[in-house]
Image (tube, helix red, strand yellow):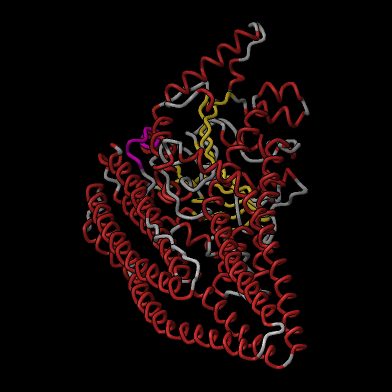
Amino acid sequence: MISQRLEAKVHEYQEWRNTLRQTITDYRDWLAKSQYSDAVQELRLYDVLEMLKRDQLVLAFLAEFSRGKTEMINALFFADFNQRLLPSEPGRTTMCPTEIFWDAREEPCIKLLPIGTRASDDSLTYLKATPNAWQKFKLNIDSPAEMQTILRKLIEQKEVTQGEAEALGLYNPQDIGMTNALKTHGLLKIPFWRHAIINYPHPLLKSGLVVIDTPGLNTLGAEPELTLSIIPNAHAVLFLTATDTGITQSDMQIWNEYIKGRTKYKLVLLNKIDMLWDALKPKQDIANEIAKQVNVTAHQLGVSPDSVFAISAQKALVAKIKKNESLLKQSGIIELETILGNQIVQAKHEILGRTVASECSEMIKGSRKIIQQRLNSLRAQIAELRGLRGQNSDATKHIFAQVVTDRKRYELSIPTFNQADEKIGHIGKKLLRHLSVDYLESALASSRKEMGDSWTTVGLNKGMRNLMKQANELAANINKQSSDIKKLADNIYQVFHSKHGFEVFNPPPLDMSNFIHNMHALEKITHDFCADPINVLTEKHFLIRKFFLGLGTQTRAIFSQAEKDCEHWLQDVLGTLKNQMAEHKASLDQRSKNLMQARASAEALDNQLALVEREYATILKEGQTLDLMLLQLIKTVKPAIKANISVKNSADFEKTIQIAPFPFLNIVPQPSS
């Protein structure tokens, strides 16, 4: 039985995304066939379409051990196997972070990253693109029993000495279980695997849904890349608590450090409410007790009770397997699936609305302006040709002289444009150099130098402050240079407006706020990490080093995105003027041709007039086609705009990282030969 409520919402989003892709494809095809073809824009549209093709909806599950995360995933996505597919049993089950999705380029399988890779400096992002680092096991989707056996590898452990655990950064002297194990057996149990990827053809996963199952607090803290990249870039986070434990200290730590101020969309699930079900109690008394637990949970976490959902994952799974609608409703999963679908779709609408749809609509508007300029020119030519009917050659000579004068005036303006374009290109190169790999590596090396060799939280904070100082100075420098570029662009637009009647276009300023926002978000995450008493007291040098390396990976992603944004801005700042100039030159050429025909004979004039009128009708239809594309895009953007507004009204929005319109975890190992 498939989660039809959640599936319906994901399918609805998929249809919305397909409509967006089709509209952008139509525009790209129109641009390629038109006389206004723009190689830079076509390449950008290709990139946008590829991004939409790979688009994902990422759903992350966070909780301490034994709160029922894996059972919830079973209930939401794997009930159609009529048994518990992912290992879920009392005690510590999921031992390594697990990503579940579908990649049609590969067969159904599970890939496991050995725990020993923690000893290297390689990031998870890098290792995901290194197939040989993983062990791969095929999944027989026609045999649930075989799949269940293979998937039990997720909970495999191995015994190591304290020294071996420390070398992998997995020994925590504050963990009572570890210290007791050492005293009793002289060995420690650690996860066999560092990370798992499950490729499985579930209908929801085929639609682009990605599910992330994270282990408890210890593992979250031991793998900085989870907290620096994967979780903050999830489109919705489900935080599970349980009625039998209440909100424990470790629950609060997960909530405060990894969810509360770092994710825009989050739901709290109060699991195991079936423990409150009692056949000897009135139903209303049970409902009151559940409502009381919900209110207490909401109060402790500082959220509205509407954000807390009372759930029984185990009963939901049973209900779906046994087709028991009454138990399914009682489990609370129906309401969860509905809200969950709304949340992740709203998150994606917000992201694509402020990136893809808005950018493409501006491109179409730009093309529409050029079309209108062409129509105005053709309309003037038609009036001019009609006015020449019955006129003598002197009238033609007079108009021809005007065209020659206009052409000379235009040609005299070209060196002015070329000088401005060259100067803008020169400043632009300097601007982009600040965001180059060499500059960033120098900044990271400087921050690393500030830390020294101690790898302490004090050193980490000092290094991050140094990096932020350089990032702020860099942004200020880029803003100044982009301001100089914009002034040059404004001036040259004004020149062509005053001399040739071009429509005034005011290029938008370069916006570096996202770059600064993302860097400040990393600074806050670093501060929170360094302020954690456990990290301060124990000074986990291995973990601090890993954290710094993770910061480097994220900083490179932020710089790379900023560099792309700057490149696009530099390409666009004079883009409209270049199109206007090309159209103006074509118009002058066309007017000269018209007049040559008019001077030949009355019949030639009539033929030329007919040609121009036909071209006018053709261009008019092209304008109407663009209008329809723009209207379709605006309709598509509407839910995205609403989502964007609602997110900006959220208090947590300012604390989240917005590095890219899709998360980095979609870099998956390619099939090995």
Q: Position of residue 480 (x, y in %)?
A: 29, 63
Q: Position of residue 43 (x, y in %)?
A: 57, 71
Of 603 and 203, which appears nearest the observer? 603
User: Is residue 39 toward the left or the right of residue 330 in the image?
Assistant: left
Q: Position of residue 34 (x, y in %)?
A: 66, 74
Report the quarter where the N terminus lies. top right
Q: Is residue 427 above or below residue 305?
A: below
| Displayed quadrant of residue 607 | bottom right
Of 367 and 195, which appears nearest the observer? 367
Q: Is residue 401 above or below residue 97?
A: below
The answer to whether residue 175 is magenta is yes
Is residue 148 something one can see in this rendering?
yes
Q: Residue at x 67, y 91 (%)?
A: 599
Q: How many marks?
A: 0
The boundaries of the magenta stretch are: 172-179
Is residue 120 something one can see in this rendering?
no
Q: Residue at x 38, y 77 (%)?
A: 420
Q: Furthest-bottom residue in view?
A: 600
The answer to whether residue 252 is magenta is no
Of 198 and 24, which appears nearest the observer? 24
User: Is residue 411 toward the left or the right of residue 101 in the image?
Assistant: left
Q: Residue at x 63, y 40 (%)?
A: 86
User: Is residue 230 toward the left or the right of residue 479 in the image?
Assistant: right
Report the quarter where the C terminus lies. bottom right
Q: Position of residue 316 (x, y in %)?
A: 67, 28
Q: Is residue 477 above or below residue 241?
A: below
